[in-house]
Image (cartoon, rainbow, N blue to C red):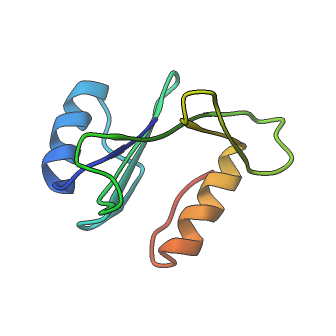
Amino acid sequence: MALSTDNIESSIEDYSKRLGVPPCAIVQGEYALWRTESLNLSVRHDPAFPPGSLRHLGWEDPTATAFSMETDVNGIVWERFAAHHQAEEIQALWPEVSVEA
């Protein structure tokens, strides 16, 4: 699940409490990613989306051979990817951030 926010720091504090773990990747003021056994959640400061809005949904699939996206009947983007695809995408956007796949 990917959400838009206008306050990364408050989002990190709130979602870390809710999920019981800190983010596995943080880009100060721009992005945070949590990985749990049941949920991947990211928040991003993205002016293209109002704060609190859904940016996209998706699922991590270890058998995925490539990152893919499609839009459903309601206009929601769904992504499918293996963990290393997500790590590669993050590294491409923010090379200074380390993400374990």
Q: On screen, 70 above or below 8?
A: above
The residue drawn where x is 32% and y is 34% is 21
Seen from the viewer's position, the closer of residues 99 and 43 is 43
Near-viewer residue (78 or 64): 78
In this view, the residue in front, 36 or 77, is 77
User: Please, which residue is most extreme toward the bottom here?
Assistant: 95
**Residue 82 point in image, percent of width and height:** 72, 43
Residue 14, position as x, y percentages in the image: 17, 36
The reply, left or right, for residue 46 in relation to residue 84 is left
Q: Residue furthest top?
A: 38
Q: Position of residue 43 (x, y in %)?
A: 34, 48
Q: Is residue 47 left or right of residue 72?
A: left
Determine whether, in the image, residue 16 is placed left or right of residue 26: left
Number of residue marks? 0
Q: At 35% across and 46% down in the image, what residue appears? A: 23
Which residue is at 52% across, 73% downward?
Answer: 93
Left-right relation of 44 to 97: left
Quarter residue 96 falls in: bottom left
Going 13% across and 48% down the picture, which residue do you hit?
10
Report x, y in % for residue 42.
Answer: 40, 45
